[in-house]
């Protein structure tokens, strides 16, 4: 069973744990920063009634370091975006999982530990041969103060945790064939729908714009014309795309395809649901490994650049441009931006925006800041406080906003009145089509769609798709929906029919669909268990408790 779990999870549960921990837990300073207030020993708390010792915490911390190195290719203290609080949180999660597994009597044999160690160390070897554990310990672990005992304990606990996930997620796997068929039909059933749109653009000509009304609209909506706190920065980007070719070339000099095969067999064919063939799954693994290598190369260059910038005294935003000129790098200068949307010039990751707003008169430089596609080194240009734009500066925009508001209200009144008329006419035996003709409206036939439909270009606005699906699947066949307001008016849907499912296709897809459904339900069941256990067992751990004066 352990082999099956490893095949389908591959670190998945650490990721789940990191994403689903409840918001009311406060991840404060680590245990090393918390004592009894009188210089006494640190209180590491209790989990499942057992007092956590300093050695327990140290062991779990060492295991976390090994996990992080194996999973991310670097040690946690090398990631500038990983805080001490994040590490302490994950270490206590590991302790919780480990103690729960022990309480349930989950046992991992030495043979299973040895087998898992060989699997892990194969990724460090050549021609599918595992690196000897002695070499791994000497070259990788010992420089970090870690031992072979730490590695073996990490493997044992990791396998136990994976069994724990299997056990706690088991209720989610208990899906009958009838329930799987019903869920398949619910998700794949397509509906034929007609829609009548009431768009503000069709009512703009009916709006009279009086100067006094526009001025009053501005006064009543001052908050809409308030510019937020803004910041302007210069930055140098180290884009992963610039390193992909060299990463691919370097990996080609190694046993790259063998490594791809190893990862494929470790992850299993179901790890990439959208990869329909082994070759497609291996292509995704190949791309991930190339990106990881490119990320390491970009990180190395970004770190070297940042060190050169930070080394110049005194610290100054101009140092960014000085070093960039020396190294032949481009300095980008986007316009001032707020924290809600970031720069208009490019789709900046959240980490970039957060770092930019962390700059001030004392912290003039930041980075490298890692995003999904690049690393950035930033320098502060200026900070701009919030302000309301004067009416004279935004008069034209205010007039457009006023006109749109009035047109939207006209469209929504028309839609509401149409539904009232439609209800009376259909009750009297008229059809939806004849009611539309009587109102001078032309319904639009939409392509059939199901709950799985990802896009419907005919809607124009992609954000409407979720509303359409929810409304269509809650409206009986042969009936019209209520008027649904949208940002620029509204819409009425008429559900004509449910389309029959292709039984041949359903029978072919049902086994894979059932397996994915069970896997998803297993995740849900495990996460529900985790929410409950963490809220109960970690709430009173001192290192995770808010300080007496409240959250920082």
Image (cartoon, rainbow, N blue to C red):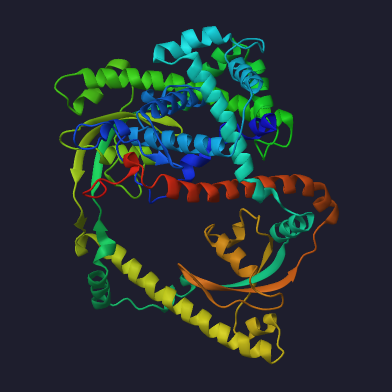
Q: Position of residue 172 (x, y in %)?
A: 65, 50
Residue 414 visible in the shown view: yes
- Left or right: 418, with 272 as reference point: left
> Measured along the vertical axis of the image, is residue 369 above or below residue 339?
above
- Left or right: 310, with 14 as reference point: left
Q: Nearer the viewer, residue 15 or 199?
A: 15
Residue 378 visible in the shown view: no
Measuring 55% from the left and 35% from the top, which residue is drawn there?
A: 102
Q: Nearer the viewer, residue 83 or 55?
A: 55
Which quarter of the figure is the C terminus placed in? Answer: top left
Q: Nearer the viewer, residue 46 or 367?
A: 46
Q: Position of residue 11 (x, y in %)?
A: 56, 32
Measuring 68% from the left and 29% from the top, which residue is drawn there?
A: 3
Q: Position of residue 509 (x, y in %)?
A: 78, 48
Measuring 59% from the left and 17% from the top, which residue is drawn there?
A: 123
Which quarter of the figure is the N terminus placed in? Answer: top right
Q: Which corner quadrant of the image does residue 327 belong to?
A: top left
Q: Which corner quadrant of the image does residue 195 belong to?
A: bottom right
Q: Position of residue 174 (x, y in %)?
A: 71, 51
Q: Which corner quadrant of the image does residue 453 belong to?
A: bottom right
> Measured along the vertical axis of the image, is residue 84 above or below residue 75?
below
Picture mark count: 0
């Amino acid at each position: 069973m352990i082999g099956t779990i490893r095949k389908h999870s591959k670190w998945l549960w650490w990721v789940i744990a990191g994403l689903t921990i409840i918001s009311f837990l406060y991840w404060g300073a680590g245990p090393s920063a918390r004592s009894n207030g009188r210089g006494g020993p640190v209180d590491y708390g209790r989990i499942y009634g057992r007092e956590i010792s300093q050695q327990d915490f140290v062991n779990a911390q060492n295991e976390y370091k090994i996990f992080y190195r194996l999973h991310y290719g670097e040690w946690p203290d090398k990631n500038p975006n990983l805080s001490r609080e994040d590490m302490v949180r994950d270490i206590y999660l590991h302790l919780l999982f480990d103690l729960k597994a022990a309480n349930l009597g989950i046992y991992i044999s030495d043979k299973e530990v040895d087998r898992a160690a060989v699997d892990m160390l194969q990724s460090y070897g050549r021609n599918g041969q595992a690196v000897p554990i002695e070499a791994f310990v000497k070259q990788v672990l010992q420089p970090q103060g870690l031992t072979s005992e730490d590695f073996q304990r990490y493997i044992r606990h990791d396998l136990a945790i994976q069994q724990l996930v299997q056990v706690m997620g088991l209720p989610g796997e208990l899906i009958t064939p009838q329930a799987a068929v019903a869920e398949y039909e619910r998700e794949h059933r397509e509906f034929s729908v007609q829609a009548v749109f009431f768009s503000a653009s069709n009512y703009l000509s009916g709006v009279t714009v009086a100067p006094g009304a526009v001025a009053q609209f501005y006064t009543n909506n001052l908050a809409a014309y308030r510019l937020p706190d803004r910041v302007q920065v210069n930055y140098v980007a180290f884009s992963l795309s610039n390193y992909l070719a060299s990463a691919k070339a370097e990996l080609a000099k190694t046993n790259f395809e063998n490594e791809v095969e190893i990862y494929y067999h470790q992850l299993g064919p179901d790890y990439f649901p959208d990869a329909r063939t082994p070759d497609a799954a291996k292509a995704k693994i190949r791309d991930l490994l190339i990106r990881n290598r490119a990320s390491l190369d970009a990180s190395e260059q970004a770190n070297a650049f940042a060190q050169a910038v930070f080394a110049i005294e005194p610290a100054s935003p101009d140092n960014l441009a000085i070093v960039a000129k020396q190294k032949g790098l481009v300095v980008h200068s986007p316009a001032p931006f707020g924290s809600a949307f970031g720069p208009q010039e490019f789709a900046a990751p959240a980490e970039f925006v957060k770092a930019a707003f962390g700059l001030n008169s004392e912290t003039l430089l930041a980075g490298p800041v890692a995003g999904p596609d690049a690393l950035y080194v930033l320098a502060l240009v200026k900070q701009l406080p919030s302000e309301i734009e004067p009416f004279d500066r935004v008069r034209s925009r205010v007039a457009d906003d006023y006109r749109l508001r009035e047109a939207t209200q006209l469209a929504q009144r028309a839609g509401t009145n149409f539904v009232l008329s439609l209800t009376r006419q259909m009750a009297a035996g008229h059809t939806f089509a004849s009611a539309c003709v009587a109102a001078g409206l032309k319904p639009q036939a939409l392509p059939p769609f199901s709950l799985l439909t990802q896009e419907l270009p005919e809607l124009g606005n992609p954000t409407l798709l979720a509303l359409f699906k929810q409304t269509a699947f809650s409206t009986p066949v042969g009936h019209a929906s209520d008027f649904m307001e949208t940002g620029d008016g509204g819409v009425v849907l008429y559900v004509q029919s449910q389309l029959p499912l292709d039984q041949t296709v359903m029978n072919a897809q049902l086994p894979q669909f059932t397996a994915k459904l069970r896997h998803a339900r297993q995740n849900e069941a495990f996460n529900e268990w985790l929410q409950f256990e963490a809220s109960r067992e970690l709430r009173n751990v001192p290192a995770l408790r808010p300080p007496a004066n409240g959250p920082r």
